[in-house]
Amino acid sequence: MNTSPNPDDPRGHPKKDSETQIVGFRMSPSLAHDVKMEASRRGMSLKALFAEMWEQYKHRSKK
């Protein structure tokens, strides 16, 4: 993994070998709590929970 400073990142974070993108959105505190609790209950990260939810959504929307 490349851990050299990224001159394009104002925070100086290292550039990652695999490109990713941060997606942010706001939600109510109660929904945020519920989502975090569900991820914790399943032993997964929020990123993994969102990816799973998105795959299920895509699968359902094809019907």
Image (cartoon, rainbow, N blue to C red):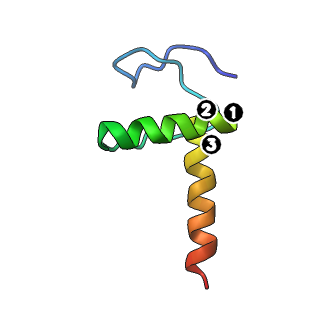
Q: Residue furthest bottom?
A: 63
> Nearer the N terminus, badge 3 or badge 1?
1
Residue at figure coordinates x 32%, y 36% from the top left: 29
Label 2 near label 1: C-beta < 8 Å?
Answer: yes
**Callout 1: helix, strand or loop?**
loop
Q: Residues within 10 Å of mark 3 (few under 14, many from 20)?
A: few
Q: Position of residue 11 (x, y in %)?
A: 37, 16
Q: Nearer the viewer, residue 62 or 28?
A: 28
Q: What x and y, as percent, mark residue 63?
A: 61, 85
Q: Residues within 10 Å of mark 1 (few under 14, many from 20)?
A: few
State whether residue 23 is above or below residue 36.
Answer: below
At label 3, the amino acid type is Ala
Could you say which quadrant of the image residue 53 lies in?
Answer: bottom right
Q: Quadrant of the N terminus?
A: top right
Measure the alpha-carbon separation of dots 3 and 1: 10 Å
Q: What's the residue type where badge 1 is placed? A: Gly
Q: Earlier in the sequence, mark 3 or mark 2?
A: 2
- Using the image, determine if residue 45 lies above or below residue 61: above
Amino acid type at image mark 2 = Ser
Q: Nearer the viewer, mark 3 or mark 2?
A: 2
Residue sitting at 33 percent across and 44 percent down? 25
Residue that mark 3 sits on: 48
Left or right of 57, for residue 42: right
Q: Say which of marks 3 and 1 sits in front.
A: 1
Q: Which residue is mark 1?
A: 43
Give SS at disc 2: helix
Tell me residue 46's x, y (percent): 55, 37
